[in-house]
Image (tube, rainbow, N blue to C red):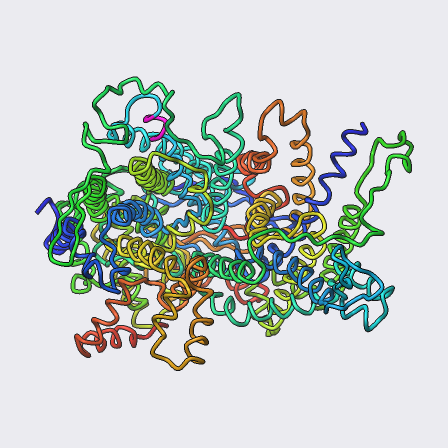
């Protein structure tokens, strides 16, 4: 029982990332009818927003500390971040330490801007082109974005730690009546899951309770009719794209302490997120979220020692296998509706 | 001739001529001149032209004719390579059985993947093929390379070791892939003045196979089968309501195109007996898509042109470094020179992938018909207003 | 017993009864029109006939065989061809190729891997296609892309492609919708010509009463998913129930 619970918990963080990316993909796909192969790149850019902010905050100058000497007897040179000069070592150090959560504030405007630029600058021109062209141009864009990041940040993963206070583990088992040390779970992963839940909840609430969201949902169900009603769909689409970009970006920001970001993380997640969208049902938002968590948890079960010794490498392919089975038995995915994006 | 009509026959003859004379034609600069870095007439690159030409010709049979966009074609290339290397390991270094086996294995794989992926069309199809290719990559990279069952040798890549059985290997045969005893690495060098030309067995093998592959593609394009494939792309509804089942047609195209990829993979292994999982990575699948659309999807010669151009640029661009750039811009004033070098720097050398991505985006935006369409547009500028007037009049008929 | 027999067909979409107890018999070699106001279930009925929709209950028999549950291409191979509201042709193919494909389909069935012949050497098929284009008056345009033709010519081509399969039943879904008067008249003439020259049954769904009364031998009026009346055009014209259905007049 405790093993099962632990694996479910372990699947939550990856599942959250899948769900957030798949949610954005489905939103864009449902409203704009575009399959965005550059969506993984948005996730990656989000992660690098955190890296950038952390680097910016840690910008330092060298000071000579006369009170200490190095092993040669010279006065010790230490790197002192400017921010510590401005706010004092306590607050300054705190800001640096909390760089990842802080970059949420920084990431939202950046990602919305990136999303707007992408939609207005490129994808807008492809609404009336064949799907193949949309796929190809966003695919090309994904390569360009990832190579730009590689150019500026290098090819190696960049460690971006979580704040001290959030980086330990907590003994979840004790809270729900298990023995001590049976279910110990990294705190940040809990934070990530809670964060994802809040974002998903916010997106759903936005779509459910605002007029804007109502129009968007109507647009997802029947784009032509809504267009005929004289509602300015174009502007809403742009905004939806911005929101989807921000969701992917935020998923990326918060993921950095779990997995140090590198330039190809976007594509790695994108392929799996596509599978998630297909399994959940193209165009179904709850389907995307459900499938995201299901597949994340499934992957975590497949990664247990028991599973990998029984069938070596099962953790690498389990998601694809499940996707194949789902598609063969339920071609529309778990929650896909008949007639949505079919020929 | 060859059962082709006049225009196709002529095209085929031109392609034969260029392919056979490539070691001359692509080496226009004397060896010691500064321009020698732009030569492409050496065996390694020529082989890649031919092999990726085959890959793109095959991809075009699927994408160009039926419109089904496969994002996982590199999987078949990789499978072909593994199959060929296994033939080397178990039986013989002769490339003929290796290539045949590569095609057979790729065919089996593409039947499986095609059967499932073709249950859906459009975007679903692209995503499914991409997922399958990534799964194949994961399988090759880690799953199938454990001590109990090592089929792919994981990260190191599959290669031939001296303790492999090689049942039909005899002493006296080259210890490298060969065609009935003639090593693929064998070359004949011709020195002519300042020029040096290399005629390599491996290249001519690839070239011959590419010509055969090209010929089959022309026949297929002009056949009733090819017409049906174009009909799928044009209007699937009408196809079905004309009493035709599009599924087997699309699957047949998928398998043929998978076999072309397997053939290309087998040849890659034949030129260098090594197979790695990175050949199956999604970037490799993206590259063949780019080759095809850059040349012109659905045209006969387009994919070959695209493959050649991409491989040539990859080769040249990756070799350029800052020193070379400084030489190029030496004529500019110092400040300007540094500025130009800084601007271009991210795109060259290790930045080849960035250039590739930019080409991708630009081609899709501005030249969706590829080089062939671009060439036709330019030709139309010169042939005068007659064609344009005709076009106008057909457009001005009421569209209702 | 008609060539096409529809018996007790019902189809619901959620709460909406799209078709309720539809019975219809189309006599062989007749022209049968199905008319009705918007939302009467004409399109639903047509989709049932061609295998796109499966009804909840009832049967659809063509020449004594059920069409239900068959794939559209199988139904087509039984001898039913369909003309769509907006012409469905192979836009990127030449007019001649458009015409060759149904002839291939007639000869080779649902699938044949003839990848090595040259299609322009298939003289028998090319000749038949050319003859067909000649009779449609499209011979001059045979090497043009079919997408560049006028709407009227696209319609002619589509009807010709259906005829090239020698169907026993030709289904037309509002063949003159959105057409100019001249094109409409051309289409009517073409259909009359077909009726005179061939042993063919034509079922036509149409809004335009001019078209219906120029062609039809029998008319079924559909209202709210059920057949209201079925009779000859003369009788339908003054029928009170029909006027009620169309104009909302009470009889």
Residue B286 shown left or right of residue B55 in the figure: right
Give above or below for B134 relative to A23: above
**Foreground residue among A305 and B123:** A305
Residue at the image point whose x is 42% and y is 75% from the top: B340
Residue B274 rendering spot, x and y as whole percentages: 37, 35
Viewer-closest of B202 and B14: B202
Q: Quadrant of the N terminus of chain A?
A: top right
Residue C239 colored in magenta in the image: no
**Direction from residue A10 to residue B260 in the image, left or right:** left
- Asked if residue B140 is positioned above or below residue B233 in the image, the reply reads above
Q: In which quarter of the image is residue C133?
A: bottom left
User: Eyeballing the image, is B43 above or below B339?
Assistant: above
Q: Where is residue A126 in the image (x, y as percent from the top left)?
A: 47, 66
Image point 19% across, 45% down: which residue? Answer: B211
Q: Main secondary structure of the magenta part?
A: helix
Q: In which quarter of the image is residue A67?
A: bottom right
Bounds of the magenta segment: B84-88
**Outermost residue toward the left?**
B1
| Relative depth, front residue between A46 and C151 | A46
> Does residue C111 appear in the picture of this structure?
no
* A45 displayed left or right of A167: left
Residue at (53, 33) in percent of width and height: B142
Q: In x, y percent, where is residue B331?
A: 34, 78
């Amino acid at each position: 029982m405790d093993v099962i619970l632990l694996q479910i918990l372990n699947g939550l963080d990856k599942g959250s990332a899948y769900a957030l990316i798949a949610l954005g993909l489905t939103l864009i796909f449902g409203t704009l009818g575009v399959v965005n192969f550059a969506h993984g790149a948005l996730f990656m850019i989000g992660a690098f927003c955190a890296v950038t902010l952390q680097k910016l905050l840690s910008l330092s100058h060298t000071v000579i500390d006369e009170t200490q000497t190095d092993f040669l007897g010279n006065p010790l040179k230490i790197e002192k971040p400017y921010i510590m000069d401005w706010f004092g070592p306590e607050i300054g150090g705190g800001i640096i330490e909390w760089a990842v959560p802080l970059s949420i504030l920084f990431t939202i405007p950046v990602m919305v801007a990136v999303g707007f630029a992408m939609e207005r600058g490129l994808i807008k021109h492809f609404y009336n082109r064949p799907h193949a062209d949309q796929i190809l141009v966003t695919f090309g864009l994904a390569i360009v974005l990832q190579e730009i990041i590689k150019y500026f940040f290098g090819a190696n993963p960049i460690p971006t730690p979580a704040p001290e206070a959030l980086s330990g583990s907590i003994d979840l088992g004790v809270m729900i009546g298990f023995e001590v040390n049976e279910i110990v779970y990294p705190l940040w992963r809990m934070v990530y899951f809670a964060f994802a839940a809040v974002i998903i909840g916010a997106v759903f609430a936005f779509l459910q309770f605002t007029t804007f969201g109502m129009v968007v949902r109507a647009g997802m169900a029947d784009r032509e009719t809504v267009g005929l009603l004289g509602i300015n769909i174009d502007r809403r689409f742009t905004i939806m794209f911005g929101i989807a970009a921000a969701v992917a970006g935020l998923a990326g920001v918060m993921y950095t302490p779990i997995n140090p970001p590198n330039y190809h993380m976007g594509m790695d997640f994108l392929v799996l997120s596509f599978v998630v969208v297909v399994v959940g049902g193209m165009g179904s938002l709850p389907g995307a979220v459900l499938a995201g968590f299901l597949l994340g948890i499934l992957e975590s079960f497949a990664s247990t020692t028991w599973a990998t010794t029984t069938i070596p490498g099962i953790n690498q392919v389990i998601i694809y296998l499940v996707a194949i089975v789902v598609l063969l038995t339920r071609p529309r995915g778990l929650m896909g509706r008949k007639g949505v994006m079919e020929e | 001739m060859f059962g082709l009509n006049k225009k196709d026959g002529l095209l085929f003859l031109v392609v034969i001529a260029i392919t056979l004379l490539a070691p001359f034609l692509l080496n226009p600069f004397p060896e010691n001149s500064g321009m020698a870095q732009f030569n492409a007439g050496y065996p390694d690159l020529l082989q890649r032209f031919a092999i990726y030409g085959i890959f793109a010709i095959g991809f075009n049979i699927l994408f160009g004719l039926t419109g089904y966009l496969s994002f996982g074609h590199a999987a078949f290339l990789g499978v072909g390579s593994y199959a060929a290397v296994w033939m080397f390991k178990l039986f013989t270094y002769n490339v003929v059985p290796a290539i045949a086996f590569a095609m057979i294995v790729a065919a089996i794989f593409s039947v499986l993947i095609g059967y499932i992926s073709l249950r859906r069309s459009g975007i679903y199809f692209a995503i499914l093929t991409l997922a399958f290719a990534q799964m194949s990559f994961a399988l090759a990279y880690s799953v199938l390379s454990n001590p109990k069952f090592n089929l792919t040798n994981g990260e190191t890549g599959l290669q031939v070791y001296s303790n492999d059985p090689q049942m039909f290997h005899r002493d006296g045969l080259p210890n490298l892939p060969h065609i009935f005893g003639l090593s693929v690495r064998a070359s004949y060098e011709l020195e002519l003045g300042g020029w040096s030309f290399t005629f390599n067995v491996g290249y001519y093998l690839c070239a011959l196979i590419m010509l055969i592959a090209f010929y089959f593609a022309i026949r297929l394009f002009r056949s009733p089968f090819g017409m049906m494939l174009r009909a799928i792309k044009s209007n699937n509804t009408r196809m079905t309501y004309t009493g035709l089942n599009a599924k087997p047609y699309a699957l047949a195209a998928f398998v043929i195109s998978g076999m072309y990829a397997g053939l290309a993979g087998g040849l890659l292994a034949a030129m260098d007996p090594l197979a790695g999982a990175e050949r199956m990575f999604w970037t490799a699948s993206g590259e063949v898509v780019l080759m095809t659309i850059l040349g012109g999807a659905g045209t006969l010669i387009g994919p070959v042109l695209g493959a050649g151009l991409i491989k040539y640029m990859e080769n040249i661009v990756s070799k350029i470094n800052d020193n070379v750039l400084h030489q190029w811009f030496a004529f500019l004033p110092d400040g300007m020179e540094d500025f130009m070098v800084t601007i271009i720097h991210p795109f060259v050398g290790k930045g080849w992938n960035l250039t590739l991505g930019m080409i991708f985006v630009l081609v899709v935006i501005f030249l969706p018909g590829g080089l062939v369409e671009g060439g036709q547009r330019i030709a139309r500028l010169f042939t005068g207003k007659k064609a344009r007037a005709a076009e106008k009049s057909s457009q001005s008929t009421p569209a209702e | 017993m008609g060539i096409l027999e529809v018996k007790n067909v019902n189809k619901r979409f959620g709460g909406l009864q799209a078709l309720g107890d539809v019975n219809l018999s189309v006599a062989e070699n007749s022209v049968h029109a199905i008319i009705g106001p918007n939302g009467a279930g004409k399109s639903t009925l047509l989709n049932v006939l061609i295998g796109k929709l499966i009804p909840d209950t009832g049967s659809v028999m063509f020449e004594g065989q059920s069409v239900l549950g068959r794939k559209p291409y199988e139904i087509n191979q039984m001898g039913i061809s369909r003309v769509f509201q907006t012409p469905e042709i192979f836009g990127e193919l030449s007019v001649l190729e458009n015409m060759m494909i149904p002839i291939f389909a007639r000869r080779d069935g649902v699938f044949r891997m003839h990848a090595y012949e040259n299609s322009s050497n298939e003289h028998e098929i090319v000749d038949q296609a050319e003859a067909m284009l000649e009779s449609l008056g499209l011979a001059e345009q045979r090497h043009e892309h079919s997408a560049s033709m006028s709407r009227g010519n696209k319609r002619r081509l589509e009807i010709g492609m259906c005829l090239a399969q020698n169907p026993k039943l030709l289904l037309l879904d509002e063949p003159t919708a959105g057409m100019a008067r001249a094109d409409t008249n051309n289409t009517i003439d073409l259909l009359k010509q077909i009726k005179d020259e061939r042993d063919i049954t034509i079922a036509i769904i149409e809004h335009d009463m001019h078209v219906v009364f120029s062609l039809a031998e029998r008319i079924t009026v559909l209202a709210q998913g059920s057949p209201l009346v079925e009779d000859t055009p003369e009788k339908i014209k003054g029928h009170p129930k029909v006027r009620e259905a169309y104009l909302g007049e009470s009889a």
